[in-house]
Image (cartoon, rainbow, N blue to C red):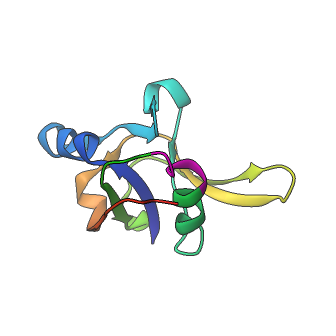
Amino acid sequence: MIYHLAELPHWEQAQRDGTYRRSTIGRSLDDEGFVHAASAEQWPGVRARFYAAVTEPLVLLHVDESRLTSPLVLEVGNPETGERFPHVYGPIDLSAVVGTTLLDPPHA
């Protein structure tokens, strides 16, 4: 299982479109080239580091990587630590999202 932090309006749009195409806060899949994701251990730190200023609820997407039709690649996200993060090189099909958790602010 991998996880992605989504802004609620983008998740709602994905439900209308049939695929999720946001990479990270303020960036689309087209902008970034992939969708940022995290492991169960990583997503709380990502939330605190990158989403602390978000004042709206977030949706944690629970993504079953075996259901992805887009390639999943583990890549170094922080060269200083060598920590690797899952990156999805294409849209996330809604059928791969097997659960969601609403996360109320604060996100730090």
As drawn, 65 above or below 92:
below
- Which residues are the magenta region? 49-53
Q: Quadrant of the N terminus?
A: bottom left
Q: Between residues 103 and 108, which one lies in front from this camera angle? A: 108
**Coordinates of residue 62 in the picture (x, y in percent):** 36, 67
Magenta-colored segment: predominant secondary structure: loop
Residue at horizontal 36 percent and vertical 50 percent from the top: 6
Is 50 colored magenta in this rendering?
Answer: yes
Q: Between residues 99 and 73, which one lies in front from this camera angle? A: 99
Horizontal placement of 5 versus 108: left or right?
left
**Coordinates of residue 43 in the picture (x, y in percent):** 53, 65
Counting labels gives: 0
**Coordinates of residue 55 in the picture (x, y in percent):** 36, 48
Residue 100 lies in quadrant: bottom left
Horizontal placement of 1 versus 7: left or right?
right
As drawn, 30 above or below 95:
above
Residue at horizontal 54 percent and vertical 30 percent from the top: 32
Q: Between residues 89 and 59, which one lies in front from this camera angle? A: 59
Residue at horizontal 51 percent and vertical 58 percent from the top: 47
Residue 14 lies in quadrant: top left
Residue at horizontal 50 percent and vertical 24 percent from the top: 31
As drawn, 41 above or below 19:
below
As drawn, 28 above or below 62:
above
